[in-house]
Image (cartoon, grey):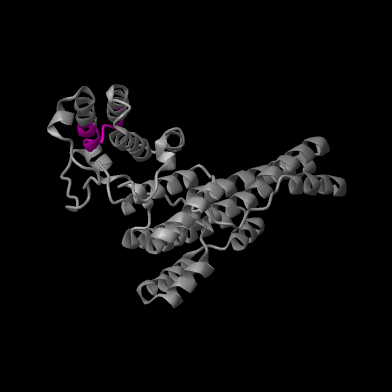
Amino acid sequence: MKKCILLFLILSISSCGRVSRELQPPICAPPHPKEVFREKRGHLSLPTCFSVSPFLPLTEEESHSDWGKEYQIALAFAEDFDLYRAITGFKRALFFIPATLKERRLEIEYAEMLSYYLGKKYTETIYIVESTDLASTDSSFPAFSDLLLILYDSYEQLGKCDHAAQIGKLIEEKEPEKAKKLALLTALKKADMAALRMEAQNSCDHAYFEKIVSSYEQGAKSINKAQILNAVFPGAGYWYVGLKESAVTSFMVNALFIAAATQFFIHGYQAAGAITLSLEGGWYFGGIYGAGLAAKSYNENLYAQFSQKITQREQLFPLFMLKYTF
């Protein structure tokens, strides 16, 4: 009997892992307003400055050229958020436009890049910049500020933190306020409570951060407590985080395995009892680990709800810092 219990403990401990305490909250940028409009075909109300182009309108001669016609058609698709057709149109316009019209070519390349970005195709976004003259533009380019934001966000989305940091330095040099917003967004994504509290202390406008952080900490579930509860009484850890169906299932499965193993031992089926007990060990310690994961997931979703109050009020996502969009 002692050997069976020892075997149970060895097999059980090997099935139990440590739950990471680092939060990975699902903080994502909300969809573009025109994307929502295209899906729902509801009333679209945008600020008057939402879609002001930084580029000069086409001249009459340009409008009647082959490339000009393609460009205008592509812009119409883009404004309807039909980005696939818009990208095709921009590519056609680039095919027709003379090489001598460098500024207009750069403008069309930017529009193509913006379409990829709005479509969340970040690899293609970066490729367009790096493979065209957009890579060598400077502050004289009308949409240079937006270009930096798009590059920063695209690198961030692809996990290229070093590249994003370099772009971030350029943004900080030219537009410190935007850089502060991006730094705040990074702190939110990393769930850096210390940085958020520091911002609350240093800025009167952001004093409400303290209340939000405190509200989250009061509502968060303890991973350790969830695991301990599930260890003492299988299912209790899930009940603690609000997963009542999982709690009942965990309790029933563990109870059935324990009951079966006990009956095997009572009737002299030691081997069958040991095997059943080892299976129970997997469920038991797996339940402890699962309860910890459930608590972590609960905290991440709770944090995302609280952080959304900040992102919405402060307009932290690069998408909503753009001066120009379709």
Asked if residue 155 shows in the view, the reply is yes
- Can you say whether 146 is above or below 83 in the image? below
Picture coordinates of residue 179, whole percent (x, y): 42, 60
- The answer to whether residue 30 shows anywhere in this view is no
Residue 56: x, y in percent?
21, 42
Residue at point 33%, 27% (across, down): 99
Q: Quadrant of residue 224?
A: bottom right
Q: Quadrant of the C terminus?
A: top left
| Count of numbered marks | 0
In x, y percent, where is residue 125?
Answer: 41, 37
Question: Which residues are drawn in magenta?
Answer: 75-84
Give whichever of 31, 119 is nearer the camera: 119
Picture coordinates of residue 192, whole percent (x, y) = 52, 63
Please identify the quarter of the rendering in which residue 281 is found.
top right
Outermost left residue: 60
Can you say whether 94 is above or below 48 in the image? above
Indicate whether 308 appears above or below 324.
Answer: below
Determine whether, in the image, residue 29 is placed left or right of residue 123. left
Tell me if residue 274 is in the magenta stretch: no
Q: Which one is in front, 289 or 268?
A: 289
Please give the name of the residue rendered at 43% of the width and 47% of the height, measured from the top-left corner. Answer: 153
Prevalent SS, magenta region: helix
* Residue 211 as seen in the image, left or right of residue 103: right
Q: Looking at the image, which is closer to me, 176 or 203? A: 176
Q: Nearer the viewer, residue 184 or 10?
A: 184
Vertical relation: 205 (above or below) 86:
below
**Residue reaching furthest right?**
3
Residue 81 falls inside the magenta stretch: yes
